[in-house]
Image (cartoon, rainbow, N blue to C red):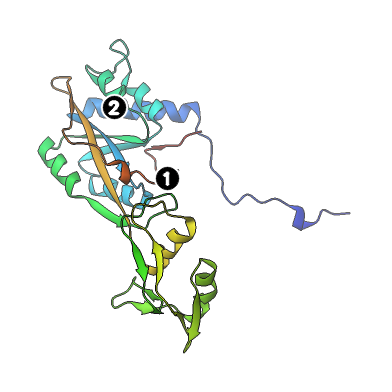
Amino acid sequence: MPKSKRSKLVSLTKVSKKTREHKSALMIEIQNSAEKWRSCWLFEVGSMRNAHLKTVRKLWKDSARIFFGKGAVMAKALGTTPEEEHRLGLAKLATQIKGQVGLLFTNTEPQEVLEWFADFQQPDFARAGNTATRTVILPAGPVMRHHSDPPEPFPHNEDPQLRKLGLSTSMVKGVPTLNAPHKLCDKGKTLTSEQAQLLKLTGVKMVTFRVGLLSRWDTATGEVLQIEGGGLPAGDKGQDDEIDAEDPDAEMSE
């Protein structure tokens, strides 16, 4: 008797495990970058989103090389001791690679790099586990979507989803409507998955993708300079995307 198709398991995602050859190639790329560029910046990302990181890569495509991913591989490429460091002073940078951080190699003047990243911010939707940055109250009346200008009410076929997410709506002239104001979230409290989904549906963005510069290695002196006031506030480090496996500069965790 042939097997039932219902019992067949189909994998919806296929992620190839990184091989030793791939890691070795990545290490060589990092070391080549240390030979080519005048400085290397260590950075961290707040509210990691692959789309925004790709934007940074695109904007710096002709003037920098960016690596973001598995810290152990990047640190090993630089060398974690004075005896192993690929170039003078890189071990000081390698020992600072902890958590979700990246490397940016460039010839751009330090002040220009600092100013560019201080200015680059991309608002985005919060995820479950992020902290609400403000209290949001949906007023009584039609439930509105703020993705467009001016805002428009939700269509009737989305009323079941709004109810499932916790809104007490009723249909008024074919429009999902609140009979009383609904507090969607409180400032300073952790967002649930339902709250995060409602914020996204209504078009309320609560997190900001940004890059915090931590330190800079200078090829001329071999010194590693700590960035005064660098890094990101703890509140900016919410639930993040996983690293994009399709990015040639990304090194996924096993």
Residue 186: image location, x then y, percent: 37, 58
Q: Tell me which residue sits at (50%, 81%) in the image.
A: 170
When the figure is inspected, residue 55 is found, relative to residue 185, above or below; the finding is above
When the figure is inspected, residue 74 is found, relative to residue 16, above or below; the finding is above
Q: Looking at the image, is mark 1 or mark 2 earlier in the sequence? A: 2
Q: Tell me which residue sits at (43%, 49%) in the image.
A: 129
Is residue 148 left or right of 88 when viewed as pictured? right
Amino acid type at circle 2 is Asn
Q: Tell me which residue sits at (10%, 38%) in the image.
A: 111
Q: Quadrant of residue 149?
A: bottom left
Q: Which mark is residue 244?
A: 1
Residue 131: image location, x then y, percent: 37, 51
Amino acid type at circle 1 is Asp
Q: Can you identify the residue that label 2 sits on?
A: 32
Between marks 1 and 2 in the image, the one whose residue lies nearer the viewer: 1
How packed mark 1 is, by other alpha carbons closer than 10 Å (few <14, some 14-19, many 20 or more), is some
How packed mark 2 is, by other alpha carbons closer than 10 Å (few <14, some 14-19, many 20 or more), is few
Q: Tell me which residue sits at (31%, 41%) in the image.
A: 234
Count of marks overlaid on the render: 2
Can residue 109 be seen in the rendering of this structure? no
Q: Residue furthest top?
A: 83
Q: Secondary structure at mark 1?
A: loop
Is residue 38 left or right of 149 when viewed as pictured? left
